[in-house]
Amino acid sequence: MGTCMILSTHANKPVEEVSRKAPTGLKWLNIYLFPNRTVTLDLVRRAESSQCKGLVVTIDNPSLGNMTKIPKDEETMIYCQNVIETHGYGHLEKYFKGYDMGPPDQYGFPMDVSSRDRSSTWEYIDWLSSKTNLPIITKGVLTAEDAILAVSHGASAVIVSNHGGRALDSVPASIEALPEVVRAIGNRVEVYVDGGIRNGIDVFKSLALGAKAVFVGRPILYGLAHSGEDGVQQILEILKSELIRTMSFAGCRSLSDIKPSFVVHESHYAKL
C-alpha cells in the first residue's frame, strides 16, 4: 500500500523477519529507553541491518500507565504469558538468554527489557544520535517546549502523541497539541501525529493543522483481527478513499491545497 510501518520493539515478530517478508516496504523500528543500553544499541544495529530507514524513540512512557484501567495483576500476568507462549516475544526473546538482565518483574520478564530508564534525560537522545546515522524520530511530544528540545538534541522529526490516551490521564488529545508543535518546529523538521485517527476526515484535519503524515494503530489491528492481511489493506483503502472524498468536499485538488483555515475549534461558532 506504499505506507510506512513502525514496528514495535514489543512486536511478536522480529525486525529481521519483517524485513524478509517486506523487503521493499518503508520500515521504522520503535525502541524504548531501556536501562540496559547494550540492548538499545543491539536493537539499533538490527534495525540498520534490516533496512530500516528510521528509529522511533518513545519518550513519553518512562513507566507503565495507571493499572486500574486493566484487569487485576493475576489476570494480566496470565494474559502476558499466554501471548508469549502462543506468539513468542519477537525482538526481545534473544535478550532473555545470554544477557545479564537483572531480576524479573512481576510478570516474569527481565527488568531490563520490561522497564524503562526512569532516570533518562535528553542525554539519552544525544547518545543515541552519536551511535547511528539513522534518523531519530521522537514519539510522545505534546508541547512546543519539548518539540524544540527534541530537535536541539538531534531529532530528525517528532510525532505528536499522547500514547493512545492510555498512559497518563488528563493530557490533551494529540490533535489539540499539534498546532503549537508545528508553529515551534514545523519549518525545521517534519511533524507527524498519532492517536485517535479513525477516518479520512481525521487525516484531513491533521494535515490541515500541519502534520506531514499521520499514524494509525487500532484501526489496523481491527482490520487484522477481522480478516488478516486483507483486512489491513481494506482499512488503509478506506482511510485513503475517505480522505479523497473529504478533499473533494473542501475543494482541494491536491494535498498542498489543504490549509489550516479548513479546521476551526467548536468554540468558533455561537452555541444556540
Image: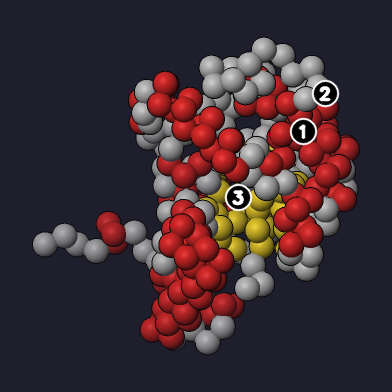
Residue at (59, 78) in percent of width and height: 256
Question: Residue flagged by tag 1: what amino acid is it?
Answer: Lys
Residue 259 picture location, percent across and down: 50, 72
Disc ID at residue 159: 3
Residue 9 picture location, percent across and down: 67, 41
Q: Is residue 24 left or right of residue 170?
A: right
Residue at (55, 25) in percent of width and height: 63
User: 260 or 198: which is nearer to us?
Assistant: 198
Which part of the image, by quadrant, shows the C terminus?
Answer: bottom left
Q: Is residue 11 left or right of residue 198?
A: right
Q: Is residue 60 visible?
A: no
What is the residue that sits farthest to the front in this orientation? 86
Q: Which residue is mark 2?
A: 98
Question: Residue flagged by tag 3: what amino acid is it?
Answer: Ile
Question: Residue flagged by tag 2: what amino acid is it?
Answer: Gly
Residue 131 picture location, percent across and down: 88, 38
**Precedes in sequence: disc 1 or disc 3:** 1
Q: Within 10 angstroms of label 1, few (less than 14), some, or many (20 or more) residues? A: few
The quarter of the picture where residue 91 lies is top right
Q: Is residue 34 visible?
A: yes
Does 188 appear above or below 132? below
Q: Which residue is mark 1?
A: 94
User: 159 or 8: which is nearer to us?
Assistant: 8
Q: Are marks 1 and 3 in contact (CB under 8 Å)?
A: no
Q: Secondary structure at mark 1?
A: helix
Does 200 appear above or below 80? below
What separation in Å lies between label 1 and label 2 (alpha carbons)? 8 Å
What separation in Å lies between label 1 and label 3 (alpha carbons)? 29 Å
Q: Are marks 1 and 2 in contact (CB under 8 Å)?
A: yes
